[in-house]
Image (cartoon, coloured by chain):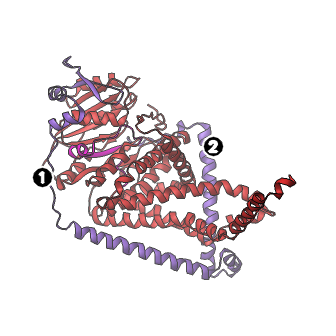
Amino acid sequence: MDKLIAQPWFQQLIDWWLIFQERFEELPWEAANELLSRFIFYYPLLMAYVWMLGGIIYYLRWERKRQNVLADLPVLTEYPPVSILIPCYNEGENVRETIEYLLHQQYPNYEIIAINDGSKDNTLEILHELAAKHPLIRVVNLASNQGKAVGLRTAALLAKSEILIGIDGDALLAPNATAWIVRHFIDNPQVGAVTGNPRIRNRSTLLGKIQVGEFSAIVGMIKRAQRAYGHVFTISGVIAGFRKTALHEVGYWSPDMVTEDIDISWKLQLAGWNIRFEPNALCWVLMPETLNGLWKQRSRWAQGGVEVMLRYFRALWCWRSRGMWLLYLECCVSLCWAFLVLAILLATPVQWMALDQPQDALEDLSPRWTSMLLCVTCLIQFAVSLSIDSHYERQSGGSAKHYYWMIWYPIVYWMINVGTTVNGCIKALRKKRGQRAVWVTLDRGLRKK
Amino acid sequence: MKDIIINQPHLQSLQQKCGSWFLSVLSWGLWLYFLLPLFTLGGWLLGVKNLSDEIRWFGGYKTLLEMLELYGEIIVVIALLWIVWTLFLSWLRSDPELKLTVPVTDAQLCVAFKVENELLQEAKAGKLLTVYFDDNAIITAINCDDTGKN
C-alpha cells in the first residue's frame, strides 16, 4: 500500500481528486437549489395564469354570445354526409346504449360505423343485432385485435363520407354535437379536425367528482387557451371530428402510438391543418373511479405524449412548424418539472434524516405567503374555469357544487400526475418503435346496470 | 340529462368510503392550514392587533405587498402578451386565402390501403364486413358478411 501511495501517478490522481472536490464545493449549489425550488413553485403558478387568461380570451371571443348551448343547433348552409365511427373492444356492456343514443342525432345525413376490434365478449353479436334493426348502422369486424388506431383507419377507408366523427364505444354523443362539429368544416376548408367537449358521467366516488372538476378546470381551460393560442396539444380521443382528406394527407392514425389522438393532432398541425375546439359538441364519457384504473389511464396518456415528442422532434425544425414550438417547449418544461418534483419528494426525507435537528426542517412546511398565494391561485383558477364551463352542467345540477369537491384536486392529482408522467416517460423510452399499440380499459367507474 | 349522470355512491366499497373520508379530512385540513396566512391577514387588517406576531412569522406585510406587486406585474405581462397575440392572429386571419380542399378519391384510398377498387366499392356498399390483416396491420382481405363475397 505504501508503495502504491508513493507512485507519482497515484499522487497526481489524489491531487486531481482534491482539486475536483474543491471546485465541486465552490459551485453555487445554494443558488442552484434556490433556483430549482423557485422553478418548482412558480412554474405551475405561472401556467395557471396563462391558462386562465387564455381561457377567458377564448370565452370572450367565441363562447360568451352563445345562447342555449345545450339545445340550440347551428344554422348550416349545407348538411354534408357524416360517418360516425365507434371503435369497440369488449364493449358488450356499453355499446348498445352508445349506439341507441347515437340514433337520436339531430342531423339529417349520417351513418354509424361500429368497429369490433376482435372483441372476446359478445360485442359483435350485439352490433349485428343492432345493425339488423337500424339501417343507419354498419358493422366492421376486425378478425383479430388490432388496436384503436387500426380500427379507425379501417373505418375511414370504408366510410362513405368526407367528414368523420370518432367516439368511444362507451360514450354518449349529445344529439346536437354532430351539427356543431360539422359547422367548422363548412366554415373553413383548412380545418382538419374538431375536438369536442367530453363530460364525465360517473360521479359516485370522490375520484369521479374530482374528475368532473378536472375536466372543466384543467382540461377544458387548457383546451380553450390553446385554441386561443392557435394550436392544441391534442384533440379529445373520446370525441373528435376529422376531414378525411386531411387524414389521408398525414397517413391516418399511427398503429404504434398508444395515444392515437395526440399523434393525429400533431401530424395534422405539422402538416398545416387547423384544429378547432367546439365546446358545444358534448360527449358523455365514463372514467375510472379507482386509483389503479386512473393510474393506468394517465400513465398511458403520459406515455403517448412523450412518444409524440420523440417522434416529431425532427419535424419541428422548420419554420412552418413554428406554431408548435411553444407547445413542445411547454411539454418539455412540464416533464422536467415532474421529474424534479419526484426527485425532491425522494430526497427530502433523506435530507431530513441527515440533519442534526430534523425538527428544524419542518419549518419548510409552515404556512407562508407563498403557499397561501399558490392556494389562492388554485381557487381562482377553479372558480374561473367552472364559471366558464357552467353552461354545460345546467341540466346536471350545475357546476358550483363541484367547486367543493375540487378542493381535493391539487393534492390528489398533482401527485398522481407526477408519478404517471415519470412512469409514462420511462415506458415511452423503453418501447420499441413500431410496436403495436393495444390496450384494455377495465375500470369504467361504479355503475349498477 | 340527469339519467346520463351516474351518481350511485352506495355502490362504493367500505375501503373506498373510508379512503374518501380520510382524503376529505386531510385535504380540508391542508387547505385551511396553508390558507391560515390569508385568514390571519384578514383579521389583522380588520384591526386584530394580536395577530402582528403571526404576520411577522409569515414573512411580514411588506413582503406580502412586494410579492403581490410582482405577481401583478407578471399577470399584466401575461395578459398583454395574450392580447397582442390575439390581435396578431386576428389580423393574420382577417383576409385568409382559404384553399379549397379536393376530397380524397377512392383511387387514392386504394393506393394508400393497398386494396383493389372493386373490393373497396363492394365493401362500402356492404353493411356487415369482416376485415383481415397481416402482422403489419395491412389489410389482406375484406369479407362482406351480408353478401358472402371477399
Q: Which residue is mark 1?
A: A77
C-alpha distance separating marks 2 and 1 = 55 Å
Amino acid at dot 2: Cys
- Percent position of residue A247, x then y: 25, 44
Q: Is residue A289 left or right of residue A134?
A: right
Q: Colour of chain B?
A: purple
Between B15 and A181, the one lying in front of the other is: A181
Q: Residue at x 21, y 29 (%)?
A: B115
Residue A162 in sight here? yes
Q: Residue at x 45, y 45 (%)?
A: A301
Magenta stretch: give its range: A232-258
Q: Residue at x 16, y 67 (%)?
A: B95
Between A150 and A129, the one lying in front of the other is: A150
Between B68 and B31, the one lying in front of the other is: B68
When asked about the image quadrant of residue A167, the answer is top left
Magenta stretch: includes residue A285: no
Residue projecting furthest to the right? A2
Q: Which residue is mark 2?
A: B18
Amino acid at dot 1: Thr
- Percent position of residue A376, x then y: 53, 67
- Percent position of residue A199, x then y: 38, 47
Q: Colour of chain A?
A: red
- Percent position of residue A204, x then y: 50, 42
Front tag of 2 and 1: 1
